Amino acid sequence: MIAALDLKVGDWVVVRSAGEILATLDESACLDELPFMPQMLQYCGKKLRVAKLAHKMCDTVHGTGARQMNDAVFLGDLRCDGHAFGGCEMTCTIVWKNAWLRRASANEVVAPTAPDERLDKLVNAATRRASPNGSANEQYFSCQATKLPVATKPLPWWRTNQYVFDYQSGNVGLSTLLSRMAFMGYSVLVSSGLGFGSALRWTYDAFQAMRGGEPFPVHAGRHPTGGVKPAVELGLQPGDLVRVKSIEQILETVDKRLMNRGMSFHSEMVPYCGKTFRVKGHVRKIINEKTGQLVTLKNSCIVLEGAGCHGRFTNPINCPRALPPYWREIWLERVDPATTTDREHQGGRLPKCEIAASPQ
């Protein structure tokens, strides 16, 4: 029996040996339905720091909202490199069950642990799914992202203990928590259908303009539903500087559901409007989280350095998954580096939040 770790943000842990982890897994390489994936093997015996507690997450598979997970954390900024999954480029944050870890002190020196051929064989075999139509040309996979619905359970927004734990765990500070909860209550009033939603949005925007803040993040797109969505090709490459267009410009490119060719403009992206970032890269292949099929995207999909999801407007709020938002090139404009000041360039580290189902 492994003792409860009671981990908090900033704690040091050591990933247990391959043999110890193997003892926790079922025949599908899962613990509580969550798989231990091949790219996690390299961290056995290594000391890492807890970045966030993974006690709740947004559902990017079925869009059901908040999901609860027990006894799990995120370590550092460890992300799936996709090598075991056909080259998937989603770069999801890796979830670690507490049973795969042990506590460590900050000054503890750790030694590498020996690999275990049985664990290696088990976790690699568990990555594959059979094609439902028997096709040998289609690749289907099983990973933490595809297993999220069965590894979690619904978490209603009114479960107040989740917000207490957000703070107690160190996932968010008290002022951040209170401001996000206030916004959640305000947005409920805006969308209540009582007839004063427009007035509340105007009031919010006016207040934010006085203090130099961002506008209300929830809007309806203005492009006709079913119409051909506008697109541009900027020929962007990693390292290029771009500025995110204004919310008004972007709303002209998306329909009422905020969709442009299968990809959504999410509320988490609104705070980045008008700011400058470097292009991190293109996303061309991802796993369809509903089916497990590896698909190639037909249209441009950009990731920006430093423009990550922070759980400000997600469901649930304070979601710690830190999934990188995806950007259409029509939402961006090139910037001449010679005319860009350090103050304008946001840059930084990229923590995906919610992406639309099956972007194309």
Image (cartoon, rainbow, N blue to C red):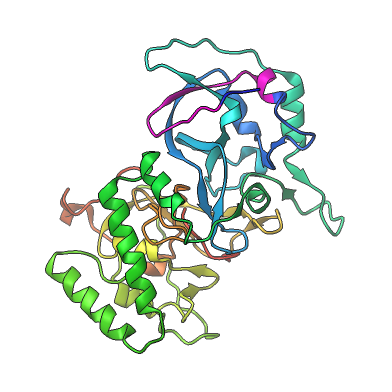
| In the foreground, 354 or 190 | 190
Q: Verify whether residue 101 appears in magenta.
A: no
Residue 243 in the image, given as x and y percentages of width and height: 28, 61
| Residue lying farthest to the bottom in this orientation | 195
Residue 235 in the image, given as x and y percentages of width and height: 42, 60
- Identify which residue is drawn at 56% across, 57% down: 59
Count of numbered circles on the image = 0
| In the foreground, 166 or 344 | 166
Left or right of 192 on screen, residue 124 = right
Residue 110 in the image, given as x and y percentages of width and height: 49, 11
Residue 317 in the image, given as x and y percentages of width and height: 41, 57
- Identify which residue is drawn at 25% across, 59% down: 275
| In the foreground, 196 or 210 | 196
Inspect this view and state whether residue 13 appears.
yes
| Residue lying farthest to the right in this orientation | 134
Quarter of the picture holding the N terminus: top right
Inspect this view and state whether residue 332 appears.
no
Left or right of 69 on screen, residue 197 = left
**55 shown above or below 291:** above
Residue segment shown in magenta: 4-21
**358 shown above or below 23:** below
- Identify which residue is drawn at 66% across, 51% down: 146
- Identify which residue is drawn at 66% across, 43% down: 85
| In the foreground, 63 or 111 | 63
Left or right of 161 on screen, residue 187 = left
Quarter of the picture holding the C terminus: bottom right
